[in-house]
Amino acid sequence: MEESFPARPVLGRLITLDLRPTRPLTFVGPAWAALCGAIASGGLDARGQSVVVLVLVILLCDTLLGAWRALWLHADWRVALPRNLASARIWLMLPDDTPTAFLPRVRRVVARRIAFARNVIWPLIDSEIIGMLIAGALAVCIAALLSPAALALTVVALLLALVEGEVGDAHAPSLCALVQIALPWLIAQSAFGYFSWLSLFFVLLFTLIYRALLGLTGARQERWLAWNNAPQLVIALVLFASNTPVGAGLVALGLLAQILWQTRFRMDRDGRAYAQRVQSYILAAMLVVSISLWF
């Protein structure tokens, strides 16, 4: 009887990669920000090279940077490593009965270093830290292929994700908004060789909007409604002032719809449901702005 496919052994491979959808709360995130940044650059077209660059940018900003951030923030090894270090402190020190002769002393030191690696480092080999390092290495390699600016922004995103894991709950959402909205947009633009101060201005406003959504879903404080509405009003005014009345009208209509949904939020205080209800208006506003920058 022929052996079934799931029962066949995996031979030779050193690394396995498991990709699956995460079912996010909203589609407002790094993938959409990267797509809008690519559109805003004006370099996106139907040529095969542009499509490949776009796929690499989305893979970099959403999958790899997202994996780096998730494996840092939700990893068991961050708890296991201090515990292993505490139990292995004795191997880092030389006891009083260490031989004074040179060769026996070297053998004792080497043996203790081996015991330290076996009890502290080796248990982490099969943990999330390996996946995190691989995701970071792949992110840096892809960014280096895109452009020097994309590489610099990717390194900044990797470092900000590490900082996010060390700061308190009050500042972590702000760093999250930068990593998931501002940097993917800018990485995509730099990959297609385009930058403008107006685009930077818009992406910072969308970062504030995303931070407001995080505040509404987390703390559920009503003050974040103002942080959600004010940037969109500014976006509509700037579009109108830059001779894009249609785009300004679309953003204003989306803002009006969000204001109507905010009355529902004030009654039920369900920030997650509110974010899901208004996500389409924010997605549309980002797309409208990116298209206006393109033209």
Image (cartoon, grey):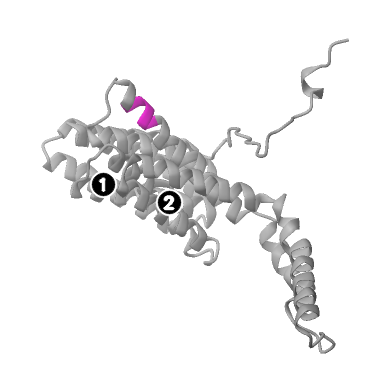
Q: What residue is at 24 percent from the left and 31 percent from the top? A: 43
Residue 190 in the image: x percent, y percent? 28, 43
* Of the pair 236 and 10, the residue shown nearer to us: 10
Which numbered marker is on residue 202?
1
**Considering only vertical position in the picture, is 295 above or below 92?**
above
Q: Residue furthest right?
A: 1
Stretch of the chain drawn in magenta = 50-54
Question: In the image, what residue type sits under mark 2?
Answer: Val
CA gap, disc 2 and disc 1:
16 Å
Question: In the image, what residue type sits under mark 1?
Answer: Phe
Residue 179 in the image: x percent, y percent? 43, 51
The majority secondary structure of the magenta stretch comes to helix
Q: What residue is at 12 percent from the left and 40 percent from the top? A: 242
Q: Magenta segment: does it hold 117? A: no
Residue 241 in the image: x percent, y percent? 12, 43
Which numbered marker is on residue 179?
2
Q: Is residue 211 among the parts visible in the rendering?
A: no
Marks 2 and 1, the one that precedes in the sequence: 2
Q: Is residue 257 among the parts visible in the rendering?
A: yes
Counting every numbered tag in the picture gives 2
- Where disc 2 sits, the SS reads helix
Q: Magenta segment: does it hold 51? A: yes
Q: Is residue 190 left or right of residue 136?
A: left
Instruction: Tell me if label 2 and label 1 are in contact, CB under 8 Å.
Output: no
**Considering only vertical position in the picture, is 49 above or below 227?**
above
Residue 186 in the image: x percent, y percent? 31, 46
Q: What residue is at 20 percent from the left and 37 percent from the top? A: 293
